[in-house]
Image: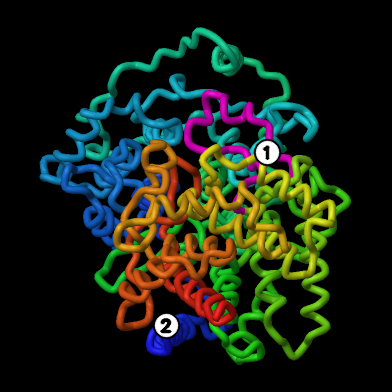
Amino acid sequence: MELETEDALSRGIEAARERLLALQHENGYWWGPLVSNACMEAEYIMLLHILDRRLPQREQAVAHHLLSTQNPDGSWSIYYGGPGDLNATLEAYQALKLLHLDPETDPMAKARQFIADHGGIEASRVFTRLWLALLGQYPWEDLPVLPPELMWLPPWFSFSIWDFASWARPTVVALSIVMAYRPVFPLNSGEDMPEIERGQKRDRRVKSGWDAFFYWVDGLLHRYHRMGWRFGRRRAIERAFQWLVDHQERDGSWGGIQPPWFYALIAFKVLDRLDHPAFQRGWEGLEAFGVHEPDGRWWFQACISPTWDTGLAVLALCGSGLEADHPALVRAGNWLLDQQVLEAVGDWAVRRPKVKPGGWPFEFVNDHYPDVDDTAIVLMALNQIRLPDDARRKRALTKGFRWMVGLQSKNGGWGAFDADNVRTWVSRIPFSDFGWVSDPPTEDVTGHVLESLGQFGYDDAWNVVQRGVDFLKGAQAADGAFFGRWGVNYIYGIGAVIPGLEAIHYNVGEAWVQRSLDWLEQHQNADGGWGESCDSYVDPSHRGVGLSTASQTAWALFALISGGRATGQAARRGVDWLMAAQSPDGGWDEPWYTGTGFPGDFYINYTLYRVIFPLLALARYRKAIRMAS
């Protein structure tokens, strides 16, 4: 590398590092707000109505936010720059009616037309129609049934709640209570939606296959619900209620995410348990997920990511050359040690009862659901820093390492929250039309685990590592790409897998690995960066296609550098793009969503990705070029 070029690169790294350091919280963690879509705010407004807890100032701030995020055609999208989404538009429209926005105003008229043009209420997902049923705007009998009797099924039995992923499980339990009662919380005059097209009634008939079977079962459950006497239902509801009480987190949430949290609060309302301490904690805890903007807007986060952000920030700072005992890293390391789940035995133990606790959660608090991905990242972060209490650090590493390895699935890969959560039937039932409801092993999580294992000196001579590699080989797409479950999309998958292989000293020169790198180079944009739209999850023609973004360009560089192509033109052009796109404050502008919640249904803009990943990519590039020269 020419001296002038390296100097410019180092200046860019230093600026990004200073920007990231300035964003650290005084308690040691990093935490960037997570932006999703209008359903969060719309459902918050509907929840206030259901709980009869109207907050006039807050409601106006939400209305301001909803109107500010509406598209010119009257719709709301589920990611920046994406097409209008019927579900989000319906829910936002109903929320604005609750906030008494005149339906004849231009925003409402346009939204109404969009809804009519896209099939009306009947074309929306189950969750949207469920919210409308709660408000008396849709008939309960036209929704699928979710019986609370599921609570009686043991973990080994198909159709039990344990076949659902961690994010869906508390949602299912809470909704089984709500749907058993089919409550309606009437709207006042002017708050209902008679002007909205219902659309063509859904045809419940399915001609063949498992879909036909599950719709037949749903029909039986509807008839069962209409029976005057239902054996064991009262006890099943009480069992579900107690499950919710037992699974509430210390911050008042369920699972650290919005859906089960809102539905659990509604379940307490339905059961007339608003005086229960768990309800009070749940209601009060909502405030921590809200974001107040300087312009008066207020919006709600679907989840929060301090552990994830902090672990990644530490890796980026260490990679940039910050001293391992720098005060910022010491504060972050001590905070991370405090976040480790060492006592609570979460749902993961149902399938791995012999594994001892030791993982890290995504959020500030989530004792029931630590996850493998966060644990892999935090282990790498703690391994690269020096702390005053080194003995405690080493104990944390040992316990976290054992927990992470213990959650390997039988097929060799790692899922996010559970081992062997692979029963696909849960996605076939009529209720599950809203995204992934199981947690199978994925390429990106497995790649991060291998990278973590490699940092601790393990290679593919160890059976655990070899099984992980075999899983990745089997999961690779025919053209060489790797699916991105938690980031958009194939660029993220490749950016997680290749560094993992390099870390375990795998021969990245093998043809199957090089196919991934070829795929990246073939999908590089003319400007030198990389980008991939969320559309890639639903339209294969969008795989690897999109406007260049800082985070996705960084992920591509991770793979090229780890795959031995740091000195190539593709990597150089990617670095040039990052340096040219860097803002004066040291960060990057990135309104695009590059995080994935549920492929095809829910996406996230991680607001710190735009600083953390480019910093780490530039630092790794500088190191690789220096070693090559």
Residue drawn where x is 26% and y is 29% of the image: 118
Q: Amino acid at mark 1?
A: Ala
**In this view, the mark in front (1 or 2):** 2
Q: Is residue 512 above or below residue 205?
A: below
Q: Is residue 304 above or below residue 439?
A: below
- Comes first in the chain, label 1 or label 2: 2
The quarter holding residue 184 reads top left
Observer-nearest of 250 and 6: 6
User: What residue is pinned by disc 1?
Assistant: 240
Q: Are marks 1 and 2 in contact (CB under 8 Å)?
A: no
Q: Is residue 256 above or below residue 175?
A: below
* Magenta span includes 443: yes
Residue drawn where x is 47% and y is 66% of the image: 568
**Magenta: predominant secondary structure element?**
loop
Residue 143 in sight here: yes
User: What residue is pinned by disc 2?
Assistant: 9
Q: Which residues are magenta?
A: 418-444
Residue 33 in sight here: no
Q: Label 2 crowding class (10 Å Cα cut-off): few <14, some 14-19, many 20+? A: many
Observer-nearest of 520 and 205: 520
The quarter of the picture where the C terminus appears is bottom right
Q: Secondary structure at mark 1?
A: helix
Position of residue 115 measured from the top left corner of the image (x, y, whole percent)? 24, 33
* Magenta span includes 166: no
Position of residue 70 measured from the top left corner of the image (x, y, whole percent)? 23, 50
Q: Secondary structure at mark 2?
A: helix
Position of residue 78 measured from the top left corner of the image (x, y, whole percent)? 35, 47
